Amino acid sequence: MTIEATPRASGASAAELDAADPLRSYRDRFIGADDPGILAYLDGNSLGRPPKSLPGLYADFIGDQWGGRLIRGWDESWLELPLRLGDRIGRETLGAAPGQVVVGDSTTVSLYKLVRTALHANAGRSEIVIDSGNFPTDRFIVEGIAAETGATLRWIDADPNQGATVDDVRAVLGQNTAVVLLSHIAYRSGYLANIREITELAHAHGALVVWDLCHSVGAVPIELDEWQVDFATGCTYKYLNGGPGSPAFVYVRSDLIASSRQPIWGWMGDKTPFDMAAGYQPADGIRRFLSGTPPVLGMLAMGEMLGLIAEVGIDAIRRKSLLLTDYAIALFDERLAQLGVTLSTPREHEVRGGHVTLDHPVFRESMAGLWQQGIIPDFRAPSGIRLGLSPLSTSFAEVELAVAAIGRLLPEAR
Ligand SMILES: *Cc1c(COP(=O)(O)O)cnc(C)c1O
């Protein structure tokens, strides 16, 4: 997808871009967007803002469901919530037909389950491919799995301002590759990997893929079924606005489910949890990827954002996301490039996700000062300020205010 006229080319101001934004009214659907103490919230890729409908939703749940139905609530609806919500995430954001997505554990635990499942499914092979720029939890999980199972790690040393490319992956694939674990969008640079081609390539070498969608779900179009992805997981508290610690989803392609053996056998993944039977028998469907009691309270909020995504459409969200990142990059070119700041995010739309990272040595010491001014991006070591631009709740004016404040941090500007 490309956008013809970038804001830079057209020289538009933040006010003009906000006025022309067909999605600008969605900002009002979020709590805190009008808080005068927060001038720019640019961390929606770490913790999305709460939708305004949440206080009512939670009050109803606590009063009617938890308070009113009590233990009966499990039989009446909560036990099915991980599957219902999974189908909805699949439909609105993943391009996944029903029966392949379930919600329940953290991304970290889900990664563990999926990588172990893939190793089991590809028995006889023992290598796990991962890139050294991947998010810490992804790297640590495979290090733990290697220590536990004897699997070997094959590290890709990708360009830190990009991420793993098709060629990077091709160079490390071999007859012993069991599974490739990569992030769809690199958490630091915002590089957007070519899922379709990397998945195809891995399959051609007899390997399975596990994709981490934490920074892409809800921000860019995803077509897991069409791309023939084997396994995927992703956060729901980032662009799905599920709230602090809301549980992750797991996707397993339908033809792999029946033979999948995930490593954490718990009663909620059993065929008949309430028979209290001897011996674990995995449930037939995607439910087998559950382990313990699902965190129902943490699963309520994301439904509101899924509703907004369905209303707006992911293509319109991606269009605004690209305009926001185009604008951030245009402001960087105009105001920061000559002050020693570097851009650590790809410029091409095809390989750019939803956030922009700028690097300068002073940024490490600057974050607290920015937050005090009500400018809230986040810091990523060693020297990056990451601007996370959540399309439905971020305005162009916020981007402009943040870049202006960042400019004032630089020694040359003082
Ligand atoms: C945010 C993020 C995680 C977080 O995992 P949790 O288990 O929710 O803490 C994992 N992987 C990537 C790529 C992330 O961006």
Image: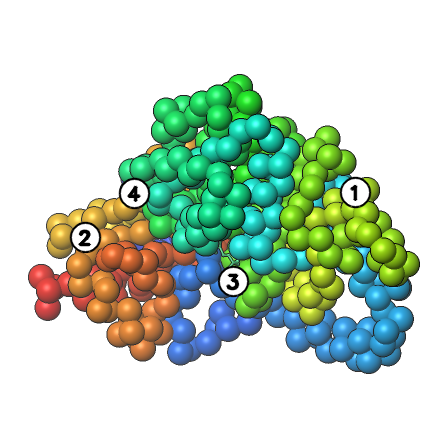
Secondary structure under the numbered disc 1 in the rendered image: loop
Dot 2 alpha-carbon crowd within 10 angstroms: few under 14, some 14 to 19, many 20 or more = many
Please tell me which residue lies in front, 182 or 388.
Answer: 182
Residue at 36% over, 29% down: 168
Q: Mark 2: which amino acid?
A: Val
Please tell me which residue lies in front, 360 or 321.
Answer: 360
Which label sits in the foreground, 3 or 4? 4
Q: Earlier in the sequence, mark 1 or mark 4?
A: 4
Q: CA distance from mark 3 to mark 4?
A: 25 Å
Location of residue 54 by image quarter: bottom right
Residue bearing mark 4 = 160
Residue 194 lies, in percent from the top left, at 46, 31
Residue bearing mark 2 = 341
As drawn, is 380 to the left or to the right of 299? left
Q: CA distance from mark 2 to mark 4?
A: 16 Å
As drawn, is 381 to the left or to the right of 271? left
Q: Earlier in the sequence, mark 3 or mark 1?
A: 3
Q: Mark 4: which amino acid?
A: Pro
